[in-house]
Amino acid sequence: MAKKIIFPYQGKEYTLAFTRATVKQMEQMGFQLSDRVAKPVTFVETLFAGAFLAYHKHVAGDQKLLDEIYGKFTDRERLINALTEMYVEPALTLLDENGAEDDEGNIAWGEAD
């Protein structure tokens, strides 16, 4: 699991995070990192909503609540940068080989002509 952002809002604690499953779900809904420049408003709204999917699915579909919560955040540029890094992290775990050499039963592979 990637790092998380935890914050209180109206007496409830919220956790923002991305998992492989939530990243896949967002991709299936058409979310693309390249939209950060091409569609910045859509990018920010979708990324922020997607960050709720892992722990608060009911919030992810409530645009009014999302707007309220997002409107209370300060330093939004840093928030979006952090969420973007968090979004990318689960995908990078697919390529991570830390400790793989020590794991018994790993699959060795090679290319054939």
Image (cartoon, grey):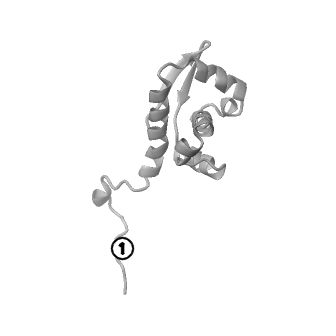
How many numbered tags mark residues here?
A: 1
Which residue occupies 34% across, 71% down?
108
- Residue sticking out furthest to the front: 38
Which residue occupies 34% across, 76% down?
110
- Residue sticking out furthest to the bottom: 113
Q: Is residue 1 visible?
A: no
Q: Nearer the viewer, residue 74 or 3?
A: 74
Residue at numbered disc 1 = 109
Q: Nearer the viewer, residue 27 or 106?
A: 27
- Quadrant in which the C terminus is drawn: bottom left
Rendered location of residue 112, percent (x, y): 37, 84
Rendered location of residue 31, percent (x, y): 60, 47
Q: Is residue 106 left or right of residue 56?
A: left
Q: Nearer the viewer, residue 111 or 66?
A: 66
- Residue sticking out furthest to the top: 11
Q: Secondary structure at mark 1?
A: loop
Rendered location of residue 18, percent (x, y): 52, 40
**Other-residue count near label 1 (Cα within 10 Å), few / some / many at <14 / 14–19 / ≥20:** few
Which residue occupies 67% across, 29% down?
59
Q: Is residue 17 left or right of residue 63?
A: left
